Image (cartoon, rainbow, N blue to C red):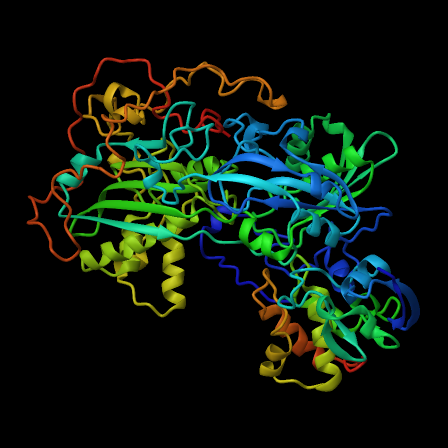
Amino acid sequence: MAKLPLQFRLNGSDRATFVDPASNLLDTLRRGLGDFGPKYGCGQGTCGVCTVLVDGEPQLACLTLAVSCEGRQIETTSGMADGPNLHPLQDAFMDHFAAQCGFCTPGMLTAARALLAKNPQPSREEVVEAISGNICRCTGYEPIIAAILAAANAPGARRA
Amino acid sequence: MATMEMRKDLFADERDDNLNVIGKGVQRQDMPGHVTARTRFFDDHAFDGMLHLKVVRSPHHHARIRAIDISAAERAPGVKRVLRGADVPVNKNTLLSLINFGKDDEPSLAVGKVSYKGEPVVAILADSEAQAQAACKLVRIDYDPLPAVFDVEETLKPGAPVVNETYPGNYFEYHERFDHQKLRFGDVERGFAGADIVMEHRYQMSPIEHAPTETNGSIAAPEQNGRYLVHSCAQGLFFALGTTAKIVDVESNQLHFIGGTVGGGFGGKVDSLTEPLAVLGAMLTGRPVRFVLDREEEMLYGSPRGAERIYIKDGLMRDGRIVARHIRSYFDAGAYTRLSSYAAIKCTAHVPGPYWIPNVASNIYVSYTNRCPSTAMRGFGVTAVDFALEVQMDRLAEAANMDPMELRILNAYRDGDMKPHRRAAKNTALVECVQVAAEKANWPLSEQAKRASSLIGGGAGERSQIPATQLDARGQIGRPDSRNGPVTQVLPAGTSRIAPSKQPVMEGARDGRATPTQVPRYEPQRPVAPPPQAYQPAPPPYQPAGSYSPPPAYQPASPPPAPPVAPAQPQHGAVRFSSVFGTRRR
């Protein structure tokens, strides 16, 4: 099948590649462009470990056709830190033991990042709602919720 | 960081208080990688020219394979190689053969028959995952369905379909010949006879899928020095390496395993489900090979925690003391052994729970059924029996009209108490755990229960003694033909060890070729041996909770008189705890 050209911005850099028309964004990021931040967990939009931001909106990369991202801004956890300076959410996740195996962490951070960008002072219920599409099998969620609430009160948390 | 309460008042003299880490929050070394997405899981590696492996799975629970036609699949677009059982160098393995425990019983790719729905039969290597999946649909397998068995007790009955030809009785053979792992301490029947209340209940635990967010998988790639690089999700990396080396028949130093980052395991990543075929594929094609289960495969065919059925029969005095406990448990291995044989040993090591009981007997079976093979999961072998034991404890408390917390404190092990495994309990702490839990829950305890201590009363009198122990017929406890037979032999009081058999458990299993040591094998006497559920309740008969039998004369804790000692006979496995760990003392 003929491949199609595709260009978008990934974590602030222009990227170009060729994809199968049926390729999803997850395979394109991971296998095509080498960004292993988003993970494969289910391939059917139920676990949230592939969550990325498309023009600031959280989307499940496994259910997003790559060609639909032409010209868009894609952001993943790999580009979340500002050089050596971690995003306040990343600091808060470290401080609150909000990761155990680490596999759901990129998706969790992305979902939380989208939340704080829109709602800098979320309630606990709003945090729970924001990560309700992200499955974690290790932590029981409480440390993750605590980390997101703490980050919301930290300086610089609204940085997208 | 969350803070942890350190109770300095408990066991203060058993502990140095110059702790540098415990009780303090310390950053984990892998955390920066996790929050920056720099942690590399097995699938986070790029290889040029990587092939994708997918397997064709059995749609039947139990079926004979008449024929396999791979011709159409081989011609499908992108397909580079199709593997069948004959392509696997050592196509029969059992995980614990690495420690010489058990017989090789599980093929990497089924030959001749399939024993569970989802069993891999054919593997396809193609340029893309989609091509491999498409080619899987082109494989034609002619099956002849066989009757299947799914119940852990039904499968042990005469005439049940044979699930696993390596174990034709449908049970794992302990010590090469016994159908279950046995524990005997004192005389449970005498204990029941002297009890005020006898209660038996049945407990059932379901299988549980670990459901890690990262599915099982691995990537194998040829290095340029005759070795193979393997990125693996394995929880036991060297276990996976040894298993793979055996199955693909290479020296272990030809395999370079990289792992350590596991995207959730919980026990479900110890089975080497993908590494052997990925390495074999890399060897046969010269290309990197990625074999990853998709979510459906992980949920349906990633091995679960095994289901267990547990029967507990207890003899209880009105004052709350448990005087006898009999446990019969069936661990559902599924179609192949994997780690279930070990689960039953752990279960045996755990009974009768953290309680001092003078008369204990347990029979723990590993049953084969036409289900997905089960494996490790978080305390497997112990968790289910603990669930059963603690529900039973609540029922006993109700029957004795006692507070359940106090019943536990009353019966808990104290330091120095002799366990049925012939070792004294030490560093016990259940009493204190219950006291603290009651305090936290504002649960009122009597002054007597509050004053109880793990350090007081343990090992007093009979509590430190190994009682005379009733064995089964011919002293060869656990033989299928004798498990309902009359008691004919007594292990003298104080006996703590019987010389283990000089026969090795297994010879030459490492290369997967040598035959097991020949030991006398039990031939099933179908008409004679009643099914195991025909357990004969001893007098007094089973009494439902609440309807008490008339209490016999109350007998303060005096041990039953020791029955006459039978002449010493050669014994096998009577008190030896297990082939694997039993005769070693750490």
> Relative to A27, is B553 above or below?
above
Residue B528 appears left or right of B224: left
Return the residue nearer the eye: B299 or B172: B299
Q: Position of residue B390 (x, y in %)?
A: 33, 53
Relative height, residue B430 to residue A157 (above, below): above
Q: Nearer the viewer, residue B515 or B444?
A: B515
The residue at 20%/25% (across/down) is B487
Say which of A40 and A150 sits in front: A40
Compared with B1, B171 (above or below) is: above
In the image, residue B217 lies at what x, y percent?
68, 48
- Between B574 and B69, the residue placed more toward the observer is B69
Q: Is residue B35 left or right of residue B25?
A: right
Q: Is residue B335 visible?
A: no
Residue at 41% across, 67% down: B440
- The answer to whether residue B248 is left or right of residue B351 is right
Residue B351: give x, y in percent of width and height.
35, 41
From the top left corner, tell me how far across and down residue A116 is, in percent.
72, 81
